[in-house]
Image: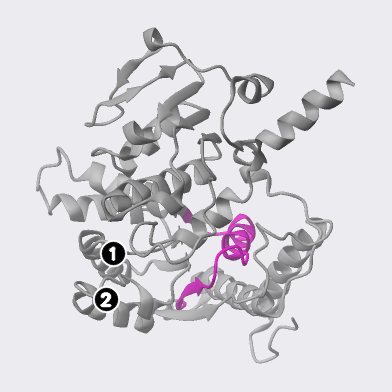
Amino acid sequence: MTPSLGRPRGQRDTVRTLLEGMALYASRSGFELEPSQRLAAERLATFGAQLTGRRRALPRKLPRSLYLHGPVGRGKTWLMDSFYVRLEARKRRVHFHDFFRRLHGGTHGLESGNGTAIQQSVDAVLSDVDVLFFDEFHVHDIGDGMFISHLLRTAAQRRVSLVVTSNYAPDDLLPNPLWHEHFLPTIEAIKDMMDVVEISGGSDFRRYPAAGTHPSPGTGAFRSGRIISPGAPGQLGRLGLFRPTSSQGRVVQPTTQPIVVKNSDPDLLWVGFDELCGGLTSTPDFLALAEMFSTWVIDDVPSPVDGDAASAPAWQRFSNVVDVLYDQDVTLFLIGSGPLDWDVEGSGSVLPVDLARIASRLSLLSRSHPDDELEREEAAGS
């Protein structure tokens, strides 16, 4: 990872410092960067040197934005965050879901004034920054695609650089064939504005961490959750969970959509799968609830293999729930009577479009099976 000798000395020093910092952090975490990760780290370090050198450059040259993509669990977010904390610049980091909550929330109640409500929302996200870091970038809805198009145009006009991570190559965004063609101009704009870097190592580090790797401190609470089947009282009791009585049920309204929940202690939310995912709830509801409750219990979770086409929207909402809770580091307990296995194929449109990412994240949760409990009971009685 030797910096190019063709760069000015100040840039070479900055590149070297950033690279050494990311490599040291990787070493302390128990692993070495894979070849594609090293390449991405070099591109990030070069970007950082160009960005911090803009003050001395006349005319000021905007560094090309970066689009890091690859399969789940290859360290894209880890690399971006490792670089983010070392970059000395005006910066902001947003996650896909939180970003769109800000945008959609900002369009309510704003007067047009000096511009449209959408423009004012985009301006707020881009204000006072030289670079916007955008994690888990994906587009499955044409409405969100319009927001993205507006964001890219405004970022270019304001000379704000972007660093993006995604599970999708630019050409694979908005894969729905009904809408993909309409998004092609935005895809071309992404490729014009950004250097596309693939991170394609052979290991999903969430599922198969390298020897000596320490869990990311940012997901410690999420990792402490459990997938529980079939949810017998003994299983739950050992985890300090007790099914709520009917008298404990109530209605919460995190945004505009009322949700019937089974219990909502000061720190714990207990809700059924159908009540949470089977209605008209949306990601802003999940984000608001994640701020209110540090532990979630979702019970009556059906087996993914038993779904049909009618259940596809519910599974997509469940996918969004997992995304939000993982990113906000909320403890999650899932309870279902059947096998809760997301490593399934051939289910067509039933399961979420981002099934691989969701399965990877849920693999972080340990499992409580009936056989495990029986073995403990037999050991206790012997």
Residue 76 shown in magenta: yes
Q: Which residue is mark 2?
A: 186
Display coloring: one colour
Q: Estimate the x, y position of residue 84 in percent, counting from the top left.
A: 58, 58
Neighbour class for label 2 at 10 Å: few (<14), some, many (≥20)?
Answer: many
For the record, the magenta segment spans 63-92
Three-letter amino acid code at the position of disc 2: Thr
Q: Estimate the x, y position of residue 228 in percent, counting from the top left.
A: 59, 35
Q: Which of the 4 image quarters holds residue 155?
A: bottom left
Name the side, left or right, on which 65 lies relative to 239. left
Name the side, left or right, on which 226 lies relative to 169. right
Say if 282 sits above or below 23 in the image.
above
Q: Nearer the viewer, residue 336 or 211?
A: 336
Discs 2, 1 touching: Cβ within 8 Å: yes
- Who's the residue at 45% across and 38% down the image? 301
Asked whether residue 135 appears in the rendered view, the answer is no
Say the numbered circle drawn on residue 324.
none
Q: Secondary structure at mark 1?
A: helix
Q: Which residue is mark 1?
A: 148
Q: Secondary structure at mark 2?
A: helix
Q: Nearer the viewer, residue 94 or 239?
A: 239
